[in-house]
Image: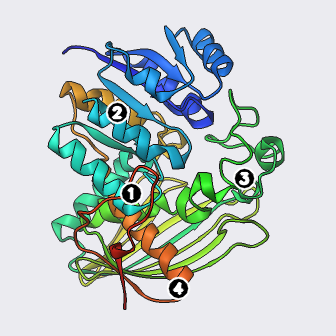
Amino acid sequence: MDRVRCAVIGAGWWGTTAHVPALLRHPKCDLVAVQHRDLATAQKTASDFGIRHAFSTAEEVLALDELDAAVVSSTPHLHYPQAKAALQRGLHVLIEKPMTITARQAAELVEIAQAKNLQFVLSAPWHYTRYAEEAKRLVQSGALGDVKLINVLMADSCIGLYRGLPWQECFGENPNAECEAQPYREPEQTSYSDPSISGGGQVYCQVSHPAAYLSLLTDARPREVFARFDNGDTRVDVFDAMLLTMSNGTLVTLAATGATGLNERIMQFRLYGLEGELSLELFTGKMRFVGADGTVRDYPDLPPEEWYPMHAPAENLVDAVLGDAPNKSPALLGLYAMEAIDAAVESAKTGKNISVAAAIKDVTNDEGTKDQGAFQHA
């Protein structure tokens, strides 16, 4: 294989903002089909971007013979059935975050991909920065010694989405690199505000980022989670506080809110080990290492275009399929994030500390019914 024939399932806001442009510009990719639940919208997208096929269902996309890979960037409640169908068809897959609605669904997808020896990539742009690679190297090489504590703060202004407000009221007056004042396609107003579609609010939409990044850095997965949520004036969580214990014993405090001022965005990681500490600010491309002896290394700030490389996941899918690059964001990280999210939701609901099962073998049915055996109350 010298080229990858790909389709985008879920050509909505993020699909047309990040994935369609990335695949079209990749010199070794042929983007052959797009899907949107409204056929006229799918056809307009195909016409505007010069794509051969337009469909209204994932089933029609997956019936195409001329496919090697698929991007699943639909709303979260559709990720599991669509990615499962694509993987079972034998396609390599890039899946958007949050990976699924439950950890068991994510586990099943990972198992299918592994059994079929397929590339299965999690769409997590921060995994592709130079600082992600260097921070992972520092942590896993022992430069910090045993990492005992990680503090994470994620704060941004997604509350308009959680309230189901029109796009212009959310970002029209204060756009950023990812959320343009007028994107090619706006998300549906229910995509983030209806928990039956989104799974939840900040914990699904945004905590899915740092939860996966934790495992990227530490090569560990969550073992226990205690969480409290506050919905503010919405149907979904907006303010989240979580305490995690990772499989390597590292303690993690993770706070997240989607209700900051429009111009404030924070994604801070502070890692504390016996031999040093590491500080990262992902929204502004900053990193500092401080050794136990007091030596300080300030890394040069990343340029703004490298802060959030939104096109990198789709590009990596193509490169990984062709063997030109490793999978830099394996979906296993999405599974670990879903273990943290699923347990946090259960903890917030029950008021209990939740122990995450070490291995999830039983899976949900196609309707997404959760097997409550995934967790143990502690």
Decide which of 65, 309 is in the foreground and name it. Answer: 65
Q: Which mark is residue 299?
A: 1
Describe the element under mark 4 as helix, strand or loop: helix
Disc 3 target residue: 161
Q: Nearer the viewer, mark 4 or mark 1?
A: 4
Q: Which mark is residue 86?
A: 2
Q: In the shown orientation, is residue 209 left or right of residue 162? A: left
Q: Residue at x 61, y 56 (%)?
A: 196
Q: If you read the primary sequence from the N terminus, does the residue marked by circle 2 or circle 3 appear first?
A: 2
Residue 213 placement (x, y as % from top left)? 38, 60
- On screen, 17 above or below 165? above
Specify the quadrant of the image occupied by residue 214: bottom left
Q: If you read the primary sequence from the N terminus, does the residue marked by circle 1 or circle 3 appear first?
A: 3
Residue 253 placement (x, y as % from top left)? 46, 80
Disc 4 target residue: 350
Q: Amino acid at mark 1?
A: Tyr
Q: Are marks 4 and 1 in contact (CB under 8 Å)?
A: no
- On screen, 18 above or below 252? above
Q: Amino acid at mark 2?
A: Ala
Q: CA distance from mark 4 to mark 2?
A: 35 Å
Residue 195 appears anywhere in the view:
yes
Q: In the shown orientation, is residue 300 left or right of residue 54? A: left
